[in-house]
Amino acid sequence: MTVNTIPPVDLVRQYKLISDDIDRAVLEVVRSGRYIGGTVVSDFEQQLAQYVGSSYCVGCNSGTDALYLALRALNIGAGDEVITTPFTFIATAETISLVGAKPVFVDIARDTFNIDVEALEAAITPQTKAIIPVHLFGQPMNMTRIMEIAQKHNLYVIEDCAQATGAKWDDKIVGSIGHIGCFSFFPTKNLGTCGDGGAVTTNDEAIAQTMRVIKEHGSAQRYYHDVVGINSRLDSIQAAILQVKLRYLDRWNEQRREIAQHYHQLLTPIPGIQLPQEIRGGYHVWNQYTILVENKSNPDTTTRDNLRDKLQEKGIISMIYYPIPLHLQKVYQSLGYQEGAFPVTEQVAQEVLSLPMFPDLSPEEQEQVAYALKDYCS
Ligand SMILES: *Cc1c(COP(=O)(O)O)cnc(C)c1O
């Protein structure tokens, strides 16, 4: 008997379905000799701007660079505070630190994994310049509340859309609602390329131009440098691949939604397991399907960790995003947060388990996952 391994994500399966288009797009760039910039990049920027519903889009090297460019363009730096979530990938906070500002964390809501909007206002000080809401796992934030709070306190909003390309809040695609939207095209994101890539979107022409200048070594005109910039390019080959994949994004997001729904049916109800829910008013694009496994073990090994091991024995690979909240990371010791500062985040970090999730995951594979999960929990 062969044991079928079910990976958390299978990029080859997706490639095989569109390999003719991808191969052609890549070879066209290789044969053109134009490897940096060119219309292949500017066309993709236009297509993404149109898709998101923003006036401007600037491609860059990664989602991390996108966040950095956004913060720089808004002139955020030393002495400034930026509010975000402690339950996200490090890049969100790291870029705040890189521009010299201070990350200020706010606890999350257990049912959305995103910033608890009701706790947000208490974190605002005279130094606060911006909020970075993260649409974690593909779940959009309540952007209506975020924008209300931002307007009231005169703050910028930078949306971290890295895990949520195509997600919607109130029928608007995320990245078009705040002042700047930041996207990552890391291979496992909803719109992932065959390498690194990122982009920023905005409706503000001046901000768009500033981000373009900063990502091109601080120059609007070649060899004239006005500010300290970086080199952050969306490669032509990646842009060509992304042009192909953008055409499939809506279909893939729909497939993710069907898979989430199927998981929900298969896993309802299992005592001790809390299933993820779509926030009302949102269109969730399920970069991750993340359950909460209530802890019944001693503090050394959580029930979640035991379940993860059991699934692995059956060839099912699940993931933990994220095991250590950012306020408890060594790099942020200097911020002075203690254990217990964000109780929801800290508990969730012990309980989260992301099940296999990608558009081409089969119903049979999902049944296998559900069977193994139920078997462990009964
Ligand atoms: C992936 C990710 C980033 C960074 O994107 P890269 O392209 O890997 O630099 C930023 N924020 C979040 C929430 C992410 O998941």
Image (cartoon, helix red, strand yellow):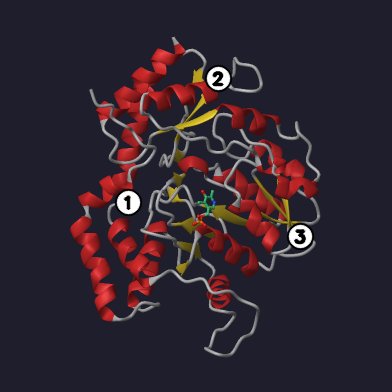
* Mark 3 close to ligand 1, CB under 8 Å: no
Name the residue: 28% across, 40% down. 360
Name the residue: 79% across, 57% down. 127
Sequence-wise first label, 2 or 1: 1
Instruction: Determine which residue is flagged by label 3.
Output: 80
Question: Does 169 appear above or below 192?
Answer: above
Real-space CA distance between mark 2 and mark 1, rounded to the nearest whole angstrom: 35 Å
Instruction: Determine which residue is flagged by label 1.
Output: 249
Looking at numbered disc 2 in the image, what kind of residue is underneath it? Thr
Q: Position of residue 357 (x, y in %)?
A: 37, 37
Q: Nearer the viewer, mark 2 or mark 1?
A: 2
For residue 203, side relative to residue 316 (left or right):
right
Real-space CA distance between mark 1 and mark 3, rounded to the nearest whole angstrom: 37 Å
Looking at numbered disc 1 in the image, what kind of residue is underneath it? Leu
Sequence-wise first label, 2 or 3: 3
Name the residue: 24% across, 73% down. 28
Determine crowd level at label 3: few under 14, some 14-19, many 20+ residues with C-alpha closer than 10 A: some
Any mark on residue 303, and which?
Answer: 2
Q: Position of residue 140 (x, y in %)?
A: 50, 43
Sequence-wise first label, 1 or 3: 3
Q: Where, quadrant-wise, is the N terminus in this rendering?
A: top left
Discs 1, 3 touching: Cβ within 8 Å = no
Q: Nearer the viewer, mark 2 or mark 3?
A: 2
Q: Quadrant of residue 267?
A: top left
